[in-house]
Image: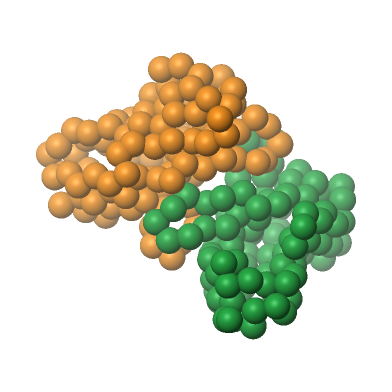
Chain colours: A green, B orange
């Protein structure tokens, strides 16, 4: 049972435009949702998080939206830059100190 | 110091070898984690240490043996591994509430 799903394995966006990465979850017990960015052969880097009691969190070019009724969250990157090209993982966190990752979406930002 | 360090970066070992992976953090985090990541897959949780005690073991084979000598260090002892154990092994640490800081990983190849 995949508790966190990222249905788009890849996304290609033009530099300067908006990138929207989507994530769906089934576990209502998640307290936080997090986005991580990963370059090849490196560990994931924390990007932004959102509490389950909020619907939006913004940090510079990155905004995460949470729709609890739809069990859906999305990461918006605007404007997209070539350096944003990486694999993005959505993760849900429950009070047991466990992170459950989605399968990842590879973002390619074209100059 | 806001990073998690892991050594070695790369490790090649035979199926009869015994080796250890090391992880260190000096952020005062009391939870530390081992993940295994195969190519094009999300990280899979292996072990969680909370306050230096093993709190979660995700049904990992006994050829992987974790150890937490103190609050800053986490080891993963490897013995009699199989070629399918070849992967990127990631260490992470956290205070609470989701945000886990990941190390760069150890790329393990089992021959």
Whether residue B108 is situated above or below residue B41 in the rendered picture:
above
Residue A50, horizontal then vertical, whole percent: 77, 50
Left or right of A54 in this view: B19 = left
Q: Residue at x 19, y 39 (%)?
A: B80
Residue B18, horizontal then vertical, whole percent: 19, 33
Q: Residue at x 64, y 58 (%)?
A: A90
Left or right of A92 in this view: B59 = left
Whether residue A99 is situated above or below residue A3 in the rendered picture:
above
Q: Seen from this angle, which residue lies furthest top?
A: B70
Left or right of B40 in this view: A45 = right
Q: Quadrant of residue A96?
A: top right
Seen from the viewer's position, the closer of residues A95 and B42 is B42
Q: Would you say residue B55 is visible in this rendering?
A: no
Q: In which quadrant is the N terminus of chain A drawn?
A: bottom right
> Number of marks in the image?
0
Residue A29, horizontal then vertical, whole percent: 74, 45
Q: Quadrant of residue B5?
A: top left
Seen from the viewer's position, the closer of residues B29 and B16 is B29
Q: In which quadrant is the C terminus of chain A drawn?
A: bottom right
Q: Residue at x 68, y 65 (%)?
A: A23
Q: Quadrant of residue B6?
A: top left
Whether residue A31 is situated above or below residue A60 in the rendered picture:
above
Q: Would you say residue B29 is visible in this rendering?
A: yes
Residue B12, horizontal then vertical, whole percent: 19, 47
Q: Residue at x 22, y 33 (%)?
A: B19
């Amino acid at each position: 049972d995949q508790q966190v799903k990222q249905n788009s394995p890849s996304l290609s966006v033009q530099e300067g435009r908006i990138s929207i990465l989507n994530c769906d979850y089934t576990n209502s017990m998640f307290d936080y949702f997090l986005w991580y960015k990963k370059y090849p052969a490196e560990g994931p880097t924390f990007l932004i998080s959102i509490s389950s009691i909020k619907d939006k969190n913004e940090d510079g070019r990155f905004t995460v939206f949470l729709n609890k009724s739809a069990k859906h969250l999305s990461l918006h990157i605007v404007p997209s830059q070539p350096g944003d090209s990486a694999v993005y993982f959505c993760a849900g966190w429950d009070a047991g100190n466990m992170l459950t990752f989605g399968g990842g979406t590879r973002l390619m930002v074209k100059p | 110091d806001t990073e998690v360090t892991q050594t070695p970066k790369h490790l090649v070992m035979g199926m009869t070898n015994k080796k250890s992976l090391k992880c260190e953090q000096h952020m005062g985090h009391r939870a530390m984690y081992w993940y295994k990541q195969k190519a094009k897959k999300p990280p899979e949780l292996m072990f969680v240490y909370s306050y230096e005690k093993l709190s979660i073991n995700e049904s990992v084979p006994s050829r992987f043996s974790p150890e937490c000598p103190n609050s800053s260090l986490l080891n993963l002892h490897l013995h009699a591994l199989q070629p399918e154990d070849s992967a990127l092994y990631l260490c992470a640490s956290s205070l609470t509430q989701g945000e886990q800081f990941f190390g760069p990983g150890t790329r393990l190849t089992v021959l």
